Image (tube, rainbow, N blue to C red):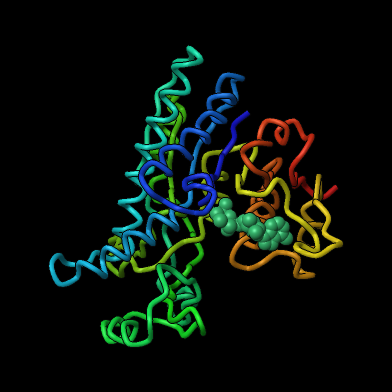
């Protein structure tokens, strides 16, 4: 069995979402313990991860240091977080495997994902990123060509395009490493968004791809049997946050789509996970799971978690 494991932001920060170096290392250790358990059971694992808090921190550095060192664009921030989180995850995985006496090599691939330059997201950016700023400071950045929105009491926030990932450019490299027996970390943060110019060249763009939609695409690309979206809740929930809340267990993709249409899943959080899980199964994946790391093994057995299966 081959599993594509998508680690959420919470799997790379502490419980309050802090992303100090020690928080990220500690979170990576917890996640890679779970991965090592799977590898020890002969489950093949390909890993991807979010990077929201890490990119947020890089953007603050950009802002604060702009007068001294040139700010780098968002695609560069994405590449930097792929590399850093990749090596942090590999260190943690090596340690977990060593303790088990399991010998597996890992590799982190800086991964580009193709998006369409005419994606509607570029006309109407919707994805909020980075920290809130007071209006005057935001205005300066607007003058530099960025889009910022008034978010009321908290201040202003930058919004960028969140284009649909169409193709994982570096999938052949990922595939070759997987076939060569490596545990691969790839397509972090949904992939570095690139567009193809008229002359066929690739160029990075200022956008962020949804990590879960990127994970669904990577899962199909590497021929995963199961897509696991590991987040900080054990299930997707109906009537979330109300007294009538109810966990979703094993569910057909049609039923889950129907729940989504009824508005059960918040657009910035559970919504894209549900969409990614449905896409993977609709396009031939055998199962998609939404759960937390603590329930990973049980969810793969089908005992717990939200398990999305093909329509009967
Ligand atoms: P990650 O950082 O792992 O990608 P997110 O924070 O984006 O995760 O999404 C997970 C969060 O989604 C949960 O912590 C929960 O607060 C929120 N959420 C919104 N709607 C639902 C729902 N219907 N069921 C479960 N969780 C939901
Ligand atoms: Mg989160």
Q: Residue 157, image x and y in percent?
A: 43, 77
Residue 17 vs 116, above or below: the answer is above
Frontmost residue, 168 versus 214: 214
Can residue 104 be seen here? yes
> Where in the figure is residue 278, as x and y percent of width and height?
69, 54
Q: Residue at left 69%, top 44%?
A: 289
Q: Is residue 35 above or below residue 139?
A: above
Q: Residue furthest left?
A: 68
Which image quarter has ligand 2?
Answer: bottom right
Query: As rendered, which of 288 and 115 lies closer to the eye?
Result: 288
Residue drawn at point x = 29 percent, y = 58 percent: 76
Q: Quadrant of residue 174?
A: top left
Report the front residue among 267 and 227.
267
State the residue at coordinates (41%, 59%).
Answer: 114
Does 274 sit left or right of 206 as displayed? right
Residue 15 percent coordinates (x, y): 54, 49
In what quadrant of the picture does the N terminus appear? top right
Residue at 51% from the left image edge and 64% from the top image edge: 164
| Quadrant of the image occupied by residue 238 | bottom right
């Amino acid at each position: 069995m081959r599993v594509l494991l998508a680690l959420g932001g919470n799997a790379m920060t502490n419980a309050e979402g802090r992303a100090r170096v020690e928080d990220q290392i500690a979170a990576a250790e917890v996640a890679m313990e779970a991965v090592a358990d799977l590898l020890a059971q002969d489950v093949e694992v390909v890993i991807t991860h979010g990077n929201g808090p890490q990119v947020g921190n890089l953007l603050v550095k950009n802002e604060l240091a702009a007068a001294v060192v040139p700010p780098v664009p968002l695609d560069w921030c994405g590449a930097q977080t792929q590399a850093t989180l990749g090596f942090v995850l590999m260190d943690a995985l090596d340690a977990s495997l060593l303790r088990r006496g399991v010998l597996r090599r890992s590799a982190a691939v800086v991964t580009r994902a193709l998006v369409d330059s005419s994606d509607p997201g570029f006309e109407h950016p919707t994805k909020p990123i980075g920290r809130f700023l007071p209006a005057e400071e935001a205005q300066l950045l607007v003058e530099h060509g960025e889009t910022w929105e008034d978010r009321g009491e908290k201040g202003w926030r930058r919004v960028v395009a969140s284009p649909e990932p169409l193709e994982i450019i570096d999938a052949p490299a990922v595939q070759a490493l997987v076939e060569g027996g490596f545990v691969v970390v790839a397509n972090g943060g949904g992939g570095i968004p690139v567009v193809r110019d008229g002359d066929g060249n690739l160029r990075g763009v200022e956008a962020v791809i949804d990590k879960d939609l990127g994970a669904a695409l990577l899962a199909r690309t590497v021929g995963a049997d199961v897509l696991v979206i590991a987040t900080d809740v054990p299930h997707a929930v109906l009537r979330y946050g109300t007294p009538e809340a109810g966990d979703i267990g094993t569910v057909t993709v049609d039923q889950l789509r129907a729940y989504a249409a009824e508005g059960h899943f918040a657009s910035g959080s559970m919504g894209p996970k549900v969409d990614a899980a449905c896409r993977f199964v609709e396009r031939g994946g055998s199962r998609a799971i939404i759960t937390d790391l603590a329930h990973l093994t049980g969810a793969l057995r089908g005992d717990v978690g939200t398990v999305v299966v093909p329509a009967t």
